[in-house]
Image (cartoon, rainbow, N blue to C red):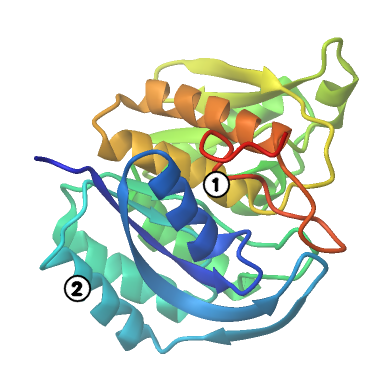
Amino acid sequence: MHIAKALTIAGSDSGGGAGIQADLKTFAALGVYGSSVITAITAQNTQQVTGIHALPPPMVARQIEAVLTDIGSDAIKTGMLGNAEIIQAVAETLRGYSGIPLVVDPVMVAKSGASLLAPEAVKTLREQLIPLAKIVTPNIPEAEVLVGKHLQSEADFIWAARAIFDMGAKMVVLKGGHQPERKRTTPAQVVDLFYDGKEARSVEGPFIDTPHTHGTGCTFASAITAGLAKGLEPYLAVLKARQYLTGALQHAFPVGQGKSPVHHFHSWWPTE
């Protein structure tokens, strides 16, 4: 029996809502066996990040080799990488596994506002990791950092997707959750932009008015990765991931005093 497998390369969230923990929960909820490579340990909860300890880059590379030379993976996702040295180690190692589709979520800032990527590492991300990606999944603030321009209009978003595509990515999903005007539509919608170098397509989902949004970006990217691991074509994987995230937001519940996580197992243990 073949079980789809996915690997996440990201930081650990002690609160369990984002990073490695969100990725593994998402993989499990979607019927995919998940392996993990930890790039950094964070001390965080639903309110704040109080500490970050990055792992030595050689140890990150050893974890990747340990998983891929034995268990293998049908798709790989990167999240928080932290600094240029870790990005370089990840990119150098993954070049040896170019046949596995890679989803790059360019994590830069936590929901609490804490910085999760050193500013000087952005150039390394652009030049070394993005060219290896099957899909890159920035939100609007992350895309602005990658392209060096403030994005306001639909034309800006399409231009940014093309610019990130030109960095070497095969496809770009520009997440629309940071577009305030979308929240004022009736009914309120979140519109992601999917660009594959040929056309820009919209991926729409309802805007869920909830404070419990911790881990949304990690969850969306890991759901896309799970879809790719199961053999879905990329656009369908993105559509399915948007549907999954919508349900996870709809059923989110408080677990702390700040921004609680989405409910990764909403199909398995409903809160109502």
Q: Which residue does the image show at 30% across and 24% down from the upper left?
A: 233
Residue beneath disc 1: 219
User: Is 257 positioned to the left or the right of 7 in the image?
Assistant: right
Q: Find the residue positioned furthest to the right.
A: 184
Question: Is label 2 or label 1 in front?
Answer: 1
Q: Nearer the viewer, residue 265 or 138?
A: 265
Residue 142 place in picture, x, y as percent: 65, 51
Q: Looking at the image, can residue 137 be seen?
A: no
Mark 2, Cα crowd under 10 Å, few <14 / some 14-19 / many 20+, is some
Q: Which residue does the image show at 54% across and 31% down from the upper left?
A: 244
- Could you tell me if the residues under marks 2 and 1 are in contact, i.e. CB atoms within 8 Å? no
The amino acid type, in three-letter code, at marker 1 is: Thr
Q: Which residue does the image show at 63% across and 59% down from the upper left?
A: 17
Question: From the image, which quarter does the N terminus lie in?
Answer: top left
Residue beneath disc 2: 65
Residue 36 place in picture, x, y as percent: 36, 66
Q: Which residue does the image show at 42% across and 74% down from the upper left?
A: 38
Residue 131 place in picture, x, y as percent: 35, 50
Q: CA distance from mark 2 to mark 1?
A: 24 Å
